[in-house]
Image: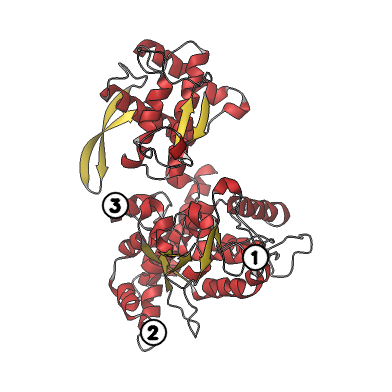
Amino acid sequence: MILSYFTAAGWQSWDVEHRPVIPEGMPIVVDDDLQFEDGPAAPRPATVINQWLRLLPASGAPAPSSWENYARAVKEWTEFLAEHGVGLFDSRDRLKAGLSRYAEHRADGPIRERFAPTTWSQHMSILSLFYRWAMEEGFAAAEPFTYRIARALYAGTGREVRMNLAVRRTPKPHVTIKYLEPEFTDLFLKGLRGLAPNGDRDTGYCGREMTRNAAIGDLALSTGLRLGEFTHLLPWEIPALPPEPTTIPIPFLVPGGITKGRKFRTTWISYTALAGLHDYLQLDRAAVTDGSGWRPPRLWGEPLQVSDPDARGARINGIRRSWASLTPAERRRLVAPDGGSCLLAVKGDGGPFTAWATVFERTADRIRARFEPRFPHVHPHRLRHSFSMRTLEYLVTGYYQQAAKLALDTDADAALVFYLTKADPLLVLRDLLGHSTVLTTEKYVKRLDTTRIYREAYETAGAAAGLIDDTAAQREAEAEFDDDTDEEL
């Protein structure tokens, strides 16, 4: 089975009356014989899969990256069944037998074929959605899954949910630390700058573009932006630097064209991180883009030439358009008035740089090998988690409230000052992360083990008010361990 991607380029020569309604970039699966049907018989499984994939944008999966994940999950399952003589829409008994063999294959098969429990569960969720749709549409008479009904309590409301028994058990979300502690955050930012933990130059490392890497890493940590969001920002979308350093975070507009679900939102950025971005823009980035002859590859489509840019938009190939209307794919094709890519981060030739997952992971590997064996793997989303934890800590402890009160007589944004002094911490975090409801934020923070934040805030506030004797509490805790020792002896 072949996985390809749809493009409407040149559709006028296809002998069709109208442009196809298939979304651009939609995955398409094709059997090896390049056929979609066998005469008047029932449609082939590939045809049914393609029909389901085309409905994804209107079924809760608007992101092209999700379409590809869904397509690969169903494709690999279909190919595995075919190898064992089982049809995609076979009888329930045969499908259940195939699922059992597939589970063993993904757990203990060849190393390159094995799935982590989380990946396996994701694939089972995708296949469950596919089979439920296929049964509703009359393509399938059975599915391979068995469910049990469980009672779930969510936001104080109980409801019944179906639990897929094929999903593997995984550790509780808070067992694995998913964010960087402050000391590790500092190590990471120094690593991106090519510095050792003490702040001196790391003489054993000869990296490139360290100013760029540090600026973008600090941007991700300070704003909570997703990988696709900070990768596709443009220089003109970066806020102006306030005339004086401020402890109040600076509003940062995130354009809807690059956000998850195309939802515009406002997050914020620290003065230090914003200053680092402006230093990169004015020096290192300007040096490599000025006069650059870079042009997007033909496979990306025609270049989009930018002229007369400002904070809201520009003329693109002569037509005025807002930045917010541009998709990530279109942003990668933008060519700046003075040459080079229009993306915020660029390579040495002025072209766009997007390989942030590799940069972050290599930096983490170097820190772990040279300085700190406990340093975790760092993927882009871990920086978003770290932003969430640090921001929630500041909100709960009242750090931002105190800073806002100090800024009342300054030129700080009055609306932001009011927001920081009055809003509930979870509501603020909801808005910064771009969640639809605070229920999503509650569920999200539970996965990050926020108990420490609330415990420390309680203890600090209690001690300051004279309600908690910190020394007595410490003695009591130590006594608990003393008791354990006595019992062991």
Is residue 72 left or right of 276 when viewed as pictured?
A: left
On the image, numbered disc 3 is attached to which residue? Answer: 439
Is residue 87 left or right of 288 when viewed as pictured?
A: left
Query: In this view of the protein, which residue sits in the foreground, 144 or 399?
Result: 144
Mark 3 and mark 2 in contact? Answer it, CB < 8 Å: no
Query: In this view of the protein, which residue sits in the foreground, 54 or 207?
Result: 54
Mark positioned earlier in the residue sequence (3 or 2) = 2
Helix, strand or loop status at disc 1: helix
Amino acid type of disc 2?
Leu
Q: Position of residue 402 (x, y in %)?
A: 38, 78
Query: Callout 1: 10 Å neighbours few (<14), some, many (20+)?
Result: many
Residue 190, disc = 1
On the image, numbered disc 2 is attached to which residue? Answer: 406
Residue 49 visible? The answer is: yes
The vertical placement of 48 against 409, above or below, is above
Query: Callout 2: 10 Å neighbours few (<14), some, many (20+)?
Result: some
In which quadrant of the rendered view does residue 49 lie?
top left
